[in-house]
Image (spheres, grey):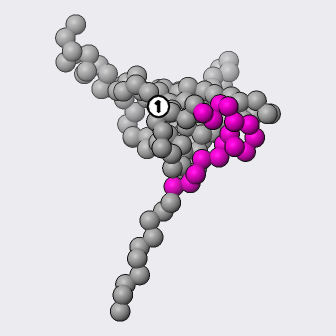
Amino acid sequence: MNQAILDKIEKEQYRKEAVKFAVGDSVRVHTKVVEGEKERIQIFAGVVIGRRGHGLNEMFTVRRISYGEGVERIFPIHSPRVDKVEVERSGSVRRAKLTYLRKRIGKGATLVKEKAKAVPAAKKK
């Protein structure tokens, strides 16, 4: 099949507004859950430990500690099931993948340094 045709089909499936978050950010992912005939929103909050893929196949992994056990979920960015992604806190990390958080226990597993905000310098007189 022609690549131009594939690109055109994929373009229709993309999310309308871009999701802006990075690895190390604490996020709340709102997912649509269908139970029988009813549909509701379920929130999964945690730290983004990795992003992979590009285009329509782009995914991100969120990790959190639930009842003392580490839980990870992988979400497709452009999925219609992912309603929205809220950034609670921006993290400052030096790695593309934070797999080392899997070995950590307790507060150390969720602790990622917060991004320092740039403070404008005071004007000299």
Residue at position x 67%, y 31% in the image: 103
Q: Is residue 21 visible?
A: yes
**Pick the front one: 22 or 93:** 93
* Left or right: 88 in relation to 54: right
Q: Is residue 63 left or right of residue 66?
A: left
Within 10 Å of disc 1 (Cα), the crowding (few <14, some 14-19, many 20+) is: some
Which x, y percent locates residue 54? 36, 27
Please report the residue visible at 75 percent of the width from the left and 34 percent of the height from the top: 66
- Is residue 71 in the magenta section? no
Depth check: 66 or 82 in front?
66
Q: Quadrant of the N terminus?
A: top left
Q: Secondary structure at mark 1?
A: strand
Q: Residue 110 in magenta?
A: yes
Q: Position of residue 79 (x, y in %)?
A: 47, 26
Magenta stretch, residue numbers: 100-115
Tally the marks.
Answer: 1
Residue nearest the observer in this picture, 86 or 41: 86
Can you identify the residue that label 1 sits on? Answer: 51
Using the rendered view, name the quadrant where residue 40 is placed. Answer: top right
